[in-house]
Amino acid sequence: MDGIVELVEFYGPIVNPAALTARMEPTLLRVAGANHAPAGKRSGSDDFSFYQDKVPSLFFFLGVTAPDRLKDAAPNHSPRFEIDESGLIQGVRALSVLTLDYMGGASAED
């Protein structure tokens, strides 16, 4: 079978709904502060698209690379990938405040 390529479509694209993104962006800006940066469009795919088929969903990236390693950090699927675990605290905070804001507008203060 050399030279034959078979494409299998499995994962759908991840597309954040415009209205949900607009509603939740102020929350992310408040939580992330100066560390917020729009990711722009990406060509990858992920099983997160299956969640988006079922419930309103917002996909965002959480930076877990140490600031001094940004230029030479290995990508997340590399065996050389390193996690700066202090970024996980920010992730839990972001998800918690997003949930509170989404569920009723009652937001947690810093």
Image (tube, rainbow, N blue to C red):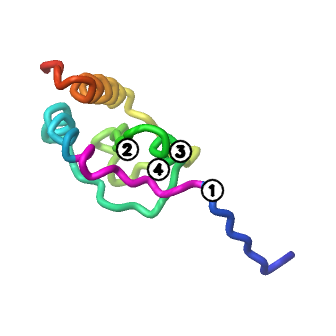
Q: Are marks 4 and 1 in contact (CB under 8 Å)?
A: no
Mark with earlier residue (1, 3): 1
x and y percent of residue 37 in the render? 22, 49
Q: Is residue 5 magenta?
A: no
Looking at this rendering, what residue extends furthest in the bottom direction? 3
* Closest to the observer, 73 or 58: 58
Label 4, label 2: how many angstroms apart (C-alpha)? Answer: 22 Å
| Predominant SS along the magenta part | loop
Which region is colored magenta?
11-21
Give the number of the disc on residue 59: 2
Give the number of the disc on residue 50: 3
Helix or strand or loop: what does disc 3 sit on?
Answer: helix
Q: Which amino acid, by three-letter code, is at mark 1?
A: Phe
Q: For residue 20, which quarter of the picture?
A: top left
Q: Is residue 13 magenta?
A: yes
Q: Which residue is mark 1?
A: 10
Label 1: few (<14), some (14–19) or many (≥20) C-alpha neighbours in 10 Å = few
x and y percent of residue 98 in the render? 26, 29
Mark with earlier residue (3, 4): 3
Mark with earlier residue (3, 2): 3
Picture quarter with the N terminus:
bottom right
Give the number of the disc on residue 99: none
Image point 78% across, 80% down: which residue? 3
* Closest to the observer, 39 or 63: 39
Q: Which amino acid, by three-letter code, is at mark 2?
A: Phe
